[in-house]
Amino acid sequence: MLLKYNVSNFKSIGHTIEFSMLPLQNDVEERFLKTIKTKAGDWKVLRRAGFFGPNASGKSTFVESIDFARDYIVEGQKSGKNTGVNQFKGKFLDIGNISTFQFMFYLNEEVYEYGFTLDRKQIYEEWLMILTEKDFVPLFTRVTDTNGKTTIDIESKFARKDSKERKLAEVLKDSIQENQKNQLFLYKLHDNGIKKAETIVEWFKGLQIIFPSTTIQGLPIRMQEDSEFRKFIADSLHRLDTGVFDISVVSDQIDFREFSEKIDLPQEIIDKVEEIKNGIVNLNGKYFIFSENKQKRTVLVQIKFDHKLNGETIKFNIDEESDGTQRLLDLLPILFAMDKKSSVIYLVDEIDRSLHTKLSQHLLNEFICKSENTLNQIIFTAHDVSLLNLNDFRKDEIWFVEKNTLGESKLKPLSDFNVQEGQDTLKAYLNGRFGAVPVIRGDL
């Protein structure tokens, strides 16, 4: 579970902003909370959080910052390359060119804190901490001084001095040479098979991030192989009044070269599909999913959606479905077999995109119901202010995002405001009571 996240100097985020999934101590309301056991006692954790604010306020930037950090941790970086961090374009002397990414999370009944700082060229600090009965203690710390010298200290809590993992970690810390200073030590540990690092990197790899542009890669193959999953999606689409009452998956062996010439696939896509032997291509709104079967033949896989039209069953392709139905295909897999997944964190940008308010509400309420006995969480951004309903949300689940006079994105939870019982939250928000609303000027 994600407990806290701090980030600074990334796109529209300037000075540090802190996001927390730990509820307020003075809020005794138990709705939507999960209790976890830690070395420091039992903690309550929120299972859901939503971000609201005007266009260009930084809601997507917040999600993108986690996406950047996750990819940097999971995929590593080639020696000598720039880090690729997209920093705040306005300069602040107190933060300079340094960006910070810091996570506190719960994994295997332990609470960890992991973070790193970097500029466009290299890492400057990196640390991994673990919670004890009293406080956080370091597993390793890394610092690059003003002379460019990098020092990594590996502590006894990481591994015993005489253990193989400790000896390997000691060797690896000396391998951070001048052209490797853009690489994370955690990734090097993971890449060399050190179990503690592998477990933590796997946690980051498990962060499921869904943007509006996220394609449904692998969905047809999954539907083809898992009839239970296909039935769940079909039944859900039917219940949600999309007009779909069943789904089928069809596949045909094809000559890939002949097919690519017929639909005029760009050469770069042809090369990529042939290299990885499977993939998804979206051309003019039509999805083409390829895989390689046991006979090494290329297979074209398509989802068909059954509709009843004038008493007949008509099969639609995915590109013939509405934007809302296609968006549901991105989101409904979140709700499938949640009890089988112990801890998955979903970050969904614009969860309400192309959806009616009632559908967005349904998805969020279903998530809470289905995740009751799991460690799953969902963090989302939305423009649909109709979701601002304290009958469905706790105050500390709602976050407002807006830019200050310096152009920085800032966060503040609804729980920071004095909201009276029975107060119309939506009306108060639209009237500017909590900020984070667009200012429409009349002098244009």
Image (cartoon, grey):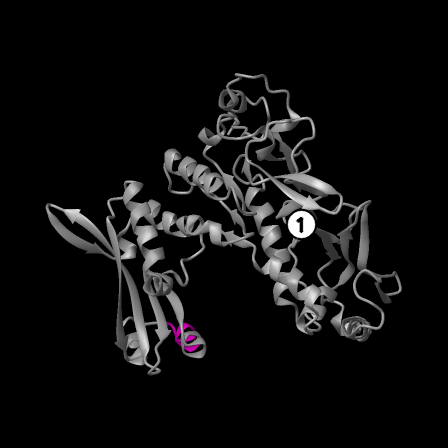
State yes or no: residue 270 in magenta: yes
Question: Where 271 sits versus 70, above or below?
Answer: below
- Main secondary structure of the magenta stretch: helix
Residue 58 at x, y percent in the picture: 58, 42
Amino acid type at mark 1: Phe
Q: Residue at x 76, y 72 (%)?
A: 165
Q: Nearer the viewer, residue 154 or 89?
A: 154
- Give the residue displayed 57% in from the left and 34% down from the top: 397
**Residue 78, quarter of picture:** bottom right
Residue toward you, 260 or 35: 35
Q: Nearer the viewer, residue 227 or 48?
A: 227
Q: Residue lying furthest left in this view?
A: 311
Which residue is depicted at the point 82% across and 52% down? 137
Q: Can residue 334 be seen at all in this image of the molecule?
A: yes
Please report the bounds of the magenta region as a residue range. Answer: 266-271
Q: How far across and down, in percent of the image, does residue 400 sit? A: 59, 33
Above or below, comparing residue 388 to residue 348 in the picture: above
Disc 1 packing (10 Å; few <14; some 14–19; many ≥20) = many
Q: Position of residue 238 (x, y in %)?
A: 27, 45
Image position of 6 with respect to 402: above or below: below
In this view, the residue in front, 148 or 314, is 314
Name the side, left or right, on which 199 lies relative to 209: right
Where on the picture, by quarter, is residue 182? bottom right
Decide: is 66 above or below 239: below
Q: Which residue is mark 1?
A: 105
Residue at 54% of width from left, 52% of height from top? 344
Element under disc 1 = strand
Can residue 408 be seen in the rendering of this structure? no
Seen from this angle, which residue lies furthest right? 147
Query: Would residue 184 be counted in the magenta stretch?
Result: no
